[in-house]
Image (cartoon, rainbow, N blue to C red):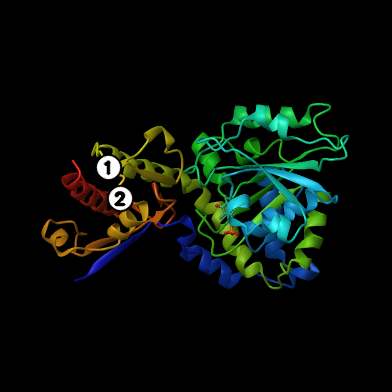
Amino acid sequence: MSTTVVDLRSDTVSLPTAEMRARMAEAIVGDDVYGEDPTVTELESKTAAIFGKEAGLFVPSGTMGNLLAIMVHCHRRGAEAIVGDLSHIFLYEQGGAAHLAGVQLATIRNQPDGTFSLQELRHKIRNYKDCHEPVTSLVVVENTHNICGGKVIPLAYLDELAALVREPGVGITRIALHMDGARVFNAAAALGVSVERITRDFDSVSVCLSKGLSAPVGSVLVGSKDFIAEAHRLRKALGGGMRQVGILAAAGLVALEQVVPLLVKDHERTKRIAAGVDKLRSPNVVVDMPSVQSNILLLQITQPKLAADEFANRLGVVEPEEIAAGVTDKQGAGIVLKASARDWEFMRLVLYHQVDDEQVELAIKKLTYVIKQYDARWP
Ligand SMILES: *Cc1c(COP(=O)(O)O)cnc(C)c1O
């Protein structure tokens, strides 16, 4: 039995485009540790310009970008960074802040919209006038918020946050703001504003080229000249000094030029899949339409006898009856839909550059069939 695969586990499975491969082959390169790779320099300065910041630094991963930001902003011993309790930095970066930077992370509860309470933040910021306390030196916002389902952080909230940390008397040292903007271009596409506006009041931003932007590797960290100079030094210590890395930066340039303008399409397609599930009015699998804001879709499993990973596994299997029922592509191949479980309750689907309209239709077909199977079993 032949099958066709629609892989919506993550936007990290996105592939370099033909144009990226062509530009990679032709890229003019040099030893970037000597500062002699013109393609890397171009990517760094173009990204900085897009964000309205002074300088940029190409790093191997978003994890390294975030870690460098923490290291530079929290250079003083006994420094603390405040991050959301559902943030990537807290959940998925191996506690690198403690592990490698000697920085204490304090968590603040993330709300379902990806924000945290600013009132709570005000009380969490610590002031070293009291010698018992660490010094709050950094606050991090994730945008879009991954675990919360690609939530776009509202501009008014960001403005209020910036006003709060800049208020005289809030913190003794200046508190820096970092945005984990792994998907900040998705936030900009969803809001119809520039990334520069979103990150205006942030001292630094880390943006991934290798997620929805479809480049094979890399992130860019942007900020002031002084901030980037320090991050550049520390990147070498972390083993992130790369040599003829213009090969990779070339793909990043194509991502900025050609993939960023198409992100709105990923969002439209994500909403289309969401609407396809919503239409079923299933008592077992539900979608909250207003929560579908960018390229991440969370499906909530309301049936207690069904775990999200079982649902995901079922979508990856083609049963013979499906073929008979016409749940196939145009050539009659069965549909393997790859998805991931966020936890026991939510299944996660993520769209990216290579997921086209046809794949969206196949995903809806498969979801409809499997959800109807569940609904027949648990009406
Ligand atoms: C993927 C991701 C990162 C880390 O990026 P890597 O390149 O995988 O290290 C950081 N923050 C968020 C929100 C992410 O989704």
Q: Are marks 2 and 1 in contact (CB under 8 Å)?
A: yes
Image: 232 above or below 187: below
Asked whether mark 2 lies closer than 8 Å to ligand 1, one says no
Q: Which residue is drawn at 40% across and 45% down?
A: 297
Label 1 near ligand 1 (CB < 8 Å):
no
For residue 284, the mark is: 1
* Quadrant containing the C terminus in the rendered view: top left
Residue 373 x/y as whole percent:
19, 50
Q: Sequence order check: which comes first, mark 2 or mark 1?
A: 1
Residue 159 visible, this orientation = no
Q: Residue 75 carries which label?
A: none
Q: Image point 61% across, 29% down: which residue?
A: 157
Disc 1 on helix, strand or loop? loop
Q: Kindly identify the amino acid type of the residue bearing the numbered disc 1.
A: Asn
* Residue at position x 44%, y 46% in the image: 296
- Disc 2 and disc 1: Cα gap in Å? 8 Å
Number of residue marks? 2
